[in-house]
C-alpha cells in the first residue's frame, strides 16, 4: 500500500516559483489564477493537517491511498470518474491502462500534491503519456503536467541526438498514445534534423581535410563522426528505425551514406542466428519471425548505389536470408547486389552453406550460379547501373572479368570435392565462366582434376564431358607436364595435351616465340611478363622438357602396344595364333580404338625419331610396326 501523504511542509515545492510556466499562462483568466492559488493552499493544508485519505487508486498491481481533492483539481479523467459515479462516496478507483503503469502514475500523483521530483529523458516519455491519459491539461489547472512535459521536451530532451533517441526508444512501449500525442513524430523529426546536420558537418570537414592534403585522416575522422551517433540508433525497434532513416533521406541525407548505419544495426539485431553447418534450426519460431522482418526491412533500405555496401556484408545478409527463409524477392535482391560487385568478392563470400536439410550439396551451388549470371548480365549491359549523383561509383575496373574468372575457378575447385555435386551441375557452372576471363586454363584443369579424383566412379563418357571444359592449348608448361602423367584423364585428353605441347615446342624451336599458332606460349609470356628470360635460356629449358616429354610418350606408346597385342591375342583363334609371328599385321575388318590411337601417336614424328630406341632383332616384327606408322 503506497500513500502519498505526510510529507513535511518543507518538502513542498512552489511549482509556480521553481519552474517557469509556459507562455500560455499569461493568457489565462484571473479566475484560473485564483483557482490555482486556492488549490495550492489546499494541498499545503492537507499535508500539514495529516488528513486521512479518502480514495484508493489501483494501478498496475499497486495501490495508492490518496485524497480526491488534489487529484480532481488537476486530473480531468479522475474528475469525470468521480462526477459520473453513482456512488457519492466513491472510495476505490481502478486505472488499469495508465501508460507507464504504477511508476508513471506515482509521478503524476506527486505532481498533483506538489511534491518535487526530477524530470529526465528516461521518464519524460512515460510522464507525457500518463499526463495525456489522465487529462492533466491547462483546462484544469495552470501550468499542468501536459504543459510542463511539453516544455521539457522542446527545451531539453529534443535538443541533442542522444536524448531524442532515448525518448523515442521509451516511446516504443507507449503506443498508440505516444503516436496520438505526436511524441514519436517529434522525436523522429528531431533525430533526422540533427543527423543531417552532423552528416553535413562531417562532409565539410572531410572536404577541408582533402584540400589540406590529409585524405587518410579525413576518412577516419568522418567514420568516427558517423559511428558515434549511428550506434545510438541501433537500440530502436525496426519499424521505428525505418521511419527514422526515411525521415533522414527526406531531409537530404544521401542514401549511400546509410551503409554504415545499416551495417551496425544488422550486426546487432541479427545476432543469435546459428547459420553455419547442417542440422535442425536452433531458433524459436517467434524469434525467427522477428529476425525475418528485421532482415527484409534492412534489405529494403539498402542503398541502390554500387559499392555502397561491402560484398562480405551482402554475403552475410544472404546467408541469413536463406537460413530464416525470407521472401524470394529479398533473396533475389541480395543476389543481384552481389552480382553487381562480384569483382570485389573473395572465395569465402561465395562459400554459402546449403540449408535445404535434404542431404544435398554442402554448398549452395545454385545461388552462386545465379550470382554469376547476374554479374554477366551487368557486364553485358555495359555497367549502366550503380552510379550516384557524385559520380563516385562508375564502371568497374577492366580487370573485374579476370578476377571473377579466377574466383569462379577457385570456387569450382572448392565444390569439386563434394561427392553430391553432379556432372551436369559442375559443367553448367563451369560453362558460365567467360573464356576471355581465363588467361590460362590451369585453374579449370585443377578443378577438373580434383573433381575426377573425388568422383572415381564416373564413366568414360562423363569424364570426357568434364575434360571438354578446358582448352588444352591454353595450359601452361607445368600444367601440361602434370596432365601428361595424369592417369585420371581420358587418353584422348592426354594425347591432345601432348599434341599442342609439341606444336608449341616446334614454334619455340623455330624461333616463332610470338607466333599466332602458339596461344599457350603467348598466354604464358603474358602471364609472366615481369620475368622473361633470354631466348637462349628459354630454348635450353624447352629442350630439357622436350626430352622428358619424349620419354613419357615412348612409355605410353609401349603401354598402348602391349594392350593392342593382348587384345589381338584374345580375339584371334589358335590356328591363326601360330602364324602370328610371320604376319603381325591384324586383319583389316577388326580395327580397334587402340589401332586408331596408335596411328595418331605415329604422327608425332619428332618424338619417334628422337627416342633413341635401338632396333629390334626381330626384323619382320619391327618392319611391320614401322610400316604401319609410316603409312598413317
Image (tube, rainbow, N blue to C red):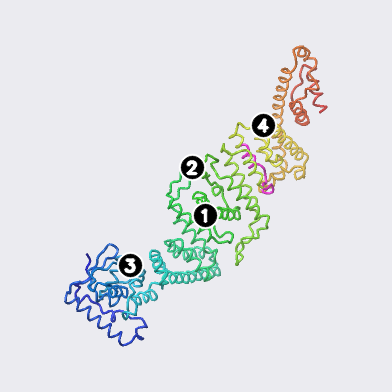
Judging by the rendered image, the residue that carries numbered circle 3 is 98
- Residue farthest to the bottom, as pictured: 30
Crowdedness near tag 2: few (<14), some (14–19) or many (≥20) residues, C-alpha within 10 Å: some
Query: Where is mark 1, residue-wise?
Result: 313
Query: For the residues marked 2 and 3, what is the alpha-carbon distance in whole angstroms?
Result: 48 Å
Question: Which residue is the site of mark 4?
Answer: 460
Residue 507 vs 264, above or below: the answer is above
For discs 2 and 3, the disc positioned in front in the rendered view: 3
Helix, strand or loop for disc 1: helix
Instruction: Report the Cα–Cα distance between label 4 and label 1.
Output: 43 Å
Q: Is residue 73 magenta?
A: no
Q: Marks 3 and 4, Cα distance to the nearest angstrom?
A: 79 Å
Q: Residues within 10 Å of mark 4 (few under 14, many from 20)?
A: few
User: What is the distance, in whole Å, between disc 2 and disc 4 at their CAs?
Assistant: 33 Å
Q: Point out the frontmost of discs 1 and 2.
A: 2
- The crowd level at tag 1 (other Cα within 10 Å; few <14, some 14-19, many 20+) is some
Residue 309 found in image quarter: bottom right
Question: Which structural element holds mark 3?
Answer: loop
Q: Residue at x 29, y 77 (%)?
A: 74
Indicate whether 214 appears above or below 27.
Answer: above
* 615 lies left or right of 68: right
Q: Secondary structure at mark 2?
A: loop
Amino acid at each position: 500500500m503506497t500513500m502519498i501523504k505526510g510529507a513535511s511542509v518543507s518538502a513542498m515545492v512552489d511549482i509556480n516559483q521553481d519552474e517557469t510556466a509556459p507562455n500560455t499562462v499569461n493568457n489565462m483568466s484571473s479566475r484560473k489564477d485564483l483557482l490555482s492559488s486556492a488549490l495550492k493552499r489546499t494541498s499545503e493544508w492537507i499535508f500539514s493537517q495529516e488528513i486521512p485519505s479518502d480514495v484508493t487508486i489501483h494501478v498496475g498491481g499497486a495501490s495508492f491511498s490518496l485524497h480526491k481533492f488534489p487529484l480532481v483539481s488537476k486530473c480531468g479523467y479522475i474528475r469525470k470518474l468521480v462526477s459520473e459515479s453513482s456512488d457519492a462516496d466513491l472510495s476505490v478507483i481502478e486505472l488499469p491502462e495508465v501508460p507507464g503503469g504504477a511508476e508513471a502514475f506515482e509521478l503524476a500523483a506527486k505532481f498533483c500534491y506538489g511534491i518535487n521530483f526530477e524530470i529526465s529523458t528516461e521518464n519524460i516519455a512515460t510522464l507525457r503519456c500518463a499526463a495525456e491519459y489522465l487529462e492533466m491539461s491547462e483546462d484544469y489547472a495552470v501550468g499542468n503536467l501536459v504543459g510542463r512535459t511539453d516544455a521539457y521536451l522542446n527545451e531539453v530532451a529534443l535538443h541533442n541526438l542522444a536524448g531524442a533517441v532515448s525518448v523515442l526508444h521509451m516511446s516504443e512501449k507507449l503506443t498508440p498514445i505516444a503516436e496520438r500525442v505526436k511524441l514519436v513524430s517529434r522525436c523522429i523529426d528531431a533525430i533526422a534534423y540533427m543527423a543531417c546536420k552532423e552528416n553535413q558537418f562531417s562532409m565539410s570537414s572531410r572536404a577541408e581535410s582533402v584540400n589540406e592534403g590529409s585524405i587518410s585522416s579525413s576518412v577516419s575522422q568522418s567514420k568516427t563522426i558517423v559511428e558515434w551517433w549511428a550506434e545510438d540508433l541501433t537500440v530502436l525497434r525496426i519499424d521505428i528505425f525505418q521511419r527514422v532513416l526515411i525521415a533522414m533521406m527526406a531531409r537530404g541525407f544521401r542514401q549511400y551514406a546509410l551503409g554504415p548505419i545499416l551495417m551496425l544495426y544488422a550486426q546487432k539485431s541479427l545476432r543469435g542466428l546459428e547459420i553455419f553447418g547442417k542440422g535442425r534450426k536452433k531458433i524459436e519460431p517467434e524469434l525467427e519471425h522477428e529476425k525475418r522482418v528485421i532482415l527484409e526491412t534492412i534489405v529494403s533500405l539498402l542503398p541502390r548505389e554500387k559499392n555502397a555496401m561491402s560484398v562480405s556484408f551482402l554475403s552475410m545478409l544472404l546467408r541469413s536470408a536463406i537460413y530464416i527463409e525470407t521472401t524470394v524477392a529479398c533473396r533475389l535482391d541480395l543476389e543481384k547486389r552481389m552480382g553487381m560487385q562480384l569483382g570485389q568478392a573473395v572465395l569465402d563470400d561465395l562459400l554459402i552453406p546449403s540449408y535445404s536439410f535434404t542431404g544435398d550439396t554442402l554448398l549452395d551451388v545454385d545461388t552462386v550460379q545465379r550470382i554469376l549470371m547476374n554479374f554477366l548480365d551487368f557486364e553485358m549491359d555495359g555497367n549502366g547501373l550503380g552510379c550516384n549523383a557524385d559520380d563516385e561509383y562508375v564502371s568497374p575496373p577492366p580487370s573485374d572479368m579476370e578476377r571473377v574468372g579466377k574466383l569462379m575457378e577457385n570456387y569450382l575447385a572448392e565444390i569439386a570435392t563434394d561427392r553430391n555435386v553432379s556432372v551436369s551441375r559442375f559443367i553448367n557452372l563451369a560453362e558460365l565462366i567467360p573464356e576471355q576471363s581465363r588467361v590460362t586454363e590451369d585453374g579449370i584443369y585443377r578443378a577438373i582434376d580434383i573433381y575426377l579424383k573425388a568422383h572415381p566412379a564416373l564413366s568414360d563418357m562423363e569424364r570426357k564431358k568434364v575434360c571438354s571444359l578446358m582448352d588444352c592449348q591454353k595450359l601452361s608448361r607445368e600444367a601440361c607436364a602434370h596432365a601428361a602423367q595424369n592417369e585420371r584423364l581420358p587418353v584422348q585428353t592426354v594425347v591432345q595435351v601432348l599434341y599442342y605441347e609439341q606444336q608449341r615446342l616446334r614454334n619455340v624451336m623455330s624461333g616463332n616465340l610470338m607466333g599466332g599458332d602458339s596461344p599457350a606460349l603467348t598466354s604464358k609470356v603474358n602471364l609472366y611478363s615481369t620475368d622473361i628470360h633470354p631466348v637462349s635460356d628459354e630454348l635450353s629449358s624447352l629442350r630439357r622438357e622436350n626430352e622428358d616429354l619424349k620419354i613419357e610418350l615412348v612409355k605410353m606408346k609401349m603401354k598402348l602396344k602391349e594392350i593392342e597385342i593382348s587384345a589381338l591375342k584374345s580375339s584371334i583363334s589358335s590356328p591363326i595364333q601360330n602364324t602370328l609371328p610371320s604376319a603381325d599385321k591384324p586383319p583389316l575388318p577388326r580395327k580397334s580404338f587402340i589401332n586408331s590411337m596408335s596411328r595418331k601417336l605415329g604422327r608425332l614424328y619428332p618424338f619417334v625419331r628422337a627416342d633413341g630406341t635401338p632396333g629390334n632383332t626381330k626384323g619382320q616384327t619391327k618392319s611391320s610396326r614401322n610400316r604401319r606408322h609410316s603409312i598413317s
